[in-house]
């Protein structure tokens, strides 16, 4: 509802299937509270939606509300049907086109780089919902809220129920496993994830312990010395294993982290960035695959 190398939109929602952002009928308006605490209201639920987030685009399809999408970013590449939807830019939106499309609602993510976007949309008088899911539990609650906003409440609840069952299974199956894991989002600077992110939450459900879970920042910059001290048993790289940058990355890891258990055992795993860096049902389904590395 956050790549350096692979991040922006990633990095850029199990409180059960009960949404904390449920709509209220107030003065004949539907009212929602977004993740910045902003009130977003409508006289009628929106029918013309623009998504500036690949995750929201996926989730709108997942609840069967794709007919409401009138614009998406060039980064929105899943499902394949997104190719038929009007593209409205990337990190630099085409504000003139967006205004001409006359959206009822625009979804953007909460991040430093998105602040100018929020300010511009607000100046243009456009209705904006800011989303910032930080855990697997919040993926569930955000999906529920999205269903309410899009008028697909029942679809969202059914999806939510299935995902919750999966999460409970992962938790019971992997709860006692604590394999030390290090995620590399970027090599220069060396950037990882803290425990405040949905990716760290997913790894925990898969039976891994994020060695930088206690960091204050969501995406902290760390040193190789820090990593050596924490000695990860597995290293995750959210990058296509066929990418041309992979040989250099592996060489750098061998040179910089050769004494870690992960590098000694060649326990370096590649994760699809379009799945692992998006707060969608696909991420939750992927936890089962990630747990197989444990």
Image (spheres, helix red, strand yellow):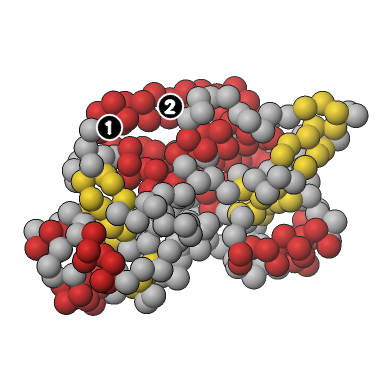
Which residue is located at x 47 percent, y 42 percent? 135
| Left or right: residue 135 compared with residue 286 | right
Image quadrant containing the N terminus:
top right
**What residue sits right under mark 1 in the picture?**
175
Element under disc 2: helix
Which residue is located at x 77 percent, y 56 percent? 101
Q: Position of residue 177 (x, y in %)?
A: 21, 37
In this rendered view, identify the residue nearer to me: 249 or 242.
249
Going from N to C along the chain, the mark reached first, 2 or 1, is 2
Q: Position of residue 267 (x, y in %)?
A: 15, 57
Would you say residue 70 is visible in this rendering?
A: no
In this rendered view, identify the residue nearer to me: 86 or 75.
75
Q: CA distance from mark 2 to mark 1?
A: 15 Å
Q: Give neighbour class at mark 1: few <14, some 14-19, many 20+ (Cα, 10 Å).
A: some
Position of 147 relative to 113 (above/below): above
In this rendered view, identify the residue nearer to me: 42 or 217.
217
| Left or right: residue 227 compared with residue 28 | left
Position of 150 relative to 214 (above/below): above
| Left or right: residue 23 compared with residue 113 | right
Q: Position of residue 35 (x, y in %)?
A: 64, 45
Determine whether label 2 and label 1 are within 8 Å by CB.
Answer: no
Q: Give neighbour class at mark 2: few <14, some 14-19, many 20+ (Cα, 10 Å).
A: many
Q: Quadrant of residue 155?
A: top right
Element under disc 1: loop
In this rendered view, identify the residue nearer to me: 291 or 233.
233
**What residue sits right under mark 2 in the picture?**
164
């Amino acid at each position: 509802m956050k790549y350096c190398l692979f991040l922006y939109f990633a990095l850029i929602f199990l409180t059960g299937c009960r949404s904390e952002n449920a709509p209220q009928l107030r003065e004949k308006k539907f009212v929602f509270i977004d993740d910045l605490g902003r009130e977003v209201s409508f006289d009628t639920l929106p029918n013309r939606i623009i998504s500036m987030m690949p995750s929201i685009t996926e989730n709108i399809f997942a609840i069967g509300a794709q007919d409401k999408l009138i614009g998406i970013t060039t980064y929105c590449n899943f499902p394949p049907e997104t190719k038929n939807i009007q593209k409205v830019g990337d990190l630099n939106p085409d504000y003139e086109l967006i205004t001409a499309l006359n959206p009822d609602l625009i979804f953007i993510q909460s991040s430093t780089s998105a602040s100018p976007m929020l300010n511009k949309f607000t100046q243009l008088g456009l209705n904006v919902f800011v989303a910032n899911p930080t855990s697997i539990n919040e993926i569930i609650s955000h999906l529920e809220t999205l269903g309410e906003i899009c008028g697909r409440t029942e679809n969202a609840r059914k999806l939510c129920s299935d995902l919750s069952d999966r999460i409970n299974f992962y938790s019971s199956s992997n709860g006692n496993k604590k394999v030390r894991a290090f995620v590399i989002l970027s090599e220069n600077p060396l950037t990882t994830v803290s425990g405040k992110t949905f990716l760290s939450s997913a790894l925990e459900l898969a039976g891994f312990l994020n060695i930088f879970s206690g960091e204050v920042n969501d995406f902290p910059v760390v040193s190789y010395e820090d990593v050596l001290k924490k000695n990860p048993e597995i290293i995750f790289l959210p990058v296509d294993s066929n990418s041309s940058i992979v040989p250099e990355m592996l060489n750098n890891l061998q040179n910089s982290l050769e004494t870690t258990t992960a590098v000694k055992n060649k326990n370096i795993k590649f994760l699809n960035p379009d799945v692992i860096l998006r707060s969608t049902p696909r991420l939750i389904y992927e936890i089962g695959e990630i747990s197989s590395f444990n």
